[in-house]
Amino acid sequence: MIPAIGLIVGILAGVFFDVSVPLELQPYLPIAIVAALDAVFGGVRAVMEGIFNDKVFVVSFIANVLIAAFIVFLGDQLGVGSQLSTAVIVVLGIRIFTNVATIRRHLFHA
């Protein structure tokens, strides 16, 4: 439940506060959001499976965002930023959909 509450608080904070991202960091924002969503859905899945650990969640959240941003940064430096961005989005997207499918199975027992 903690990941879901954190997600809701984060969304509300983004809606009510004027947040501006520096121009040089804007290419990394979508990747960071998808990486953070992967950690959040993984946390929700862990709660439903009864194995949630707050330390693991925090480390997973931070590590996902940093590693994904680093891969995109490395791709930008090598001149293949869009290809690596797509690869990161695909991998994290698969993980998100896998977690959501597991959550759905837990909720609907199907």
Image (tube, rainbow, N blue to C red):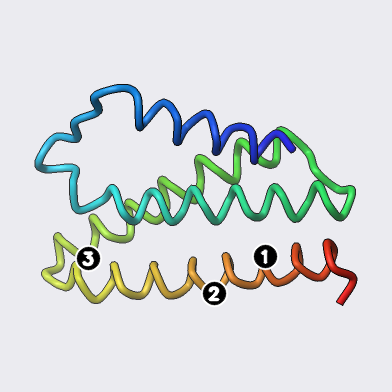
Residue closer to the observer: 96 or 78: 96
Count neighbours of disc 3 (C-alpha within 10 A) and say few if under 14, some if 14 to 19, many if 20 or more: some
Marks 2/3 in contact by CB < 8 Å: the verdict is no
**Helix, strand or loop at disc 2?**
helix
Picture layout, residue 89 above or below residue 24: below
Numbered disc total: 3
Q: Which mark is residue 39?
A: none
**Residue bearing the label numbered 1:** 99
Quarter that holds the N terminus? top right
**Residue bearing the label numbered 3:** 75
Residue flagged by tag 3: what amino acid is it? Gly
Picture layout, residue 13 above or below residue 50: above
Residue flagged by tag 1: what amino acid is it? Asn
Q: Distance between the residues labelled 1 and 3?
A: 27 Å
**Residue bearing the label numbered 2:** 94
Residue flagged by tag 2: what amino acid is it? Ile
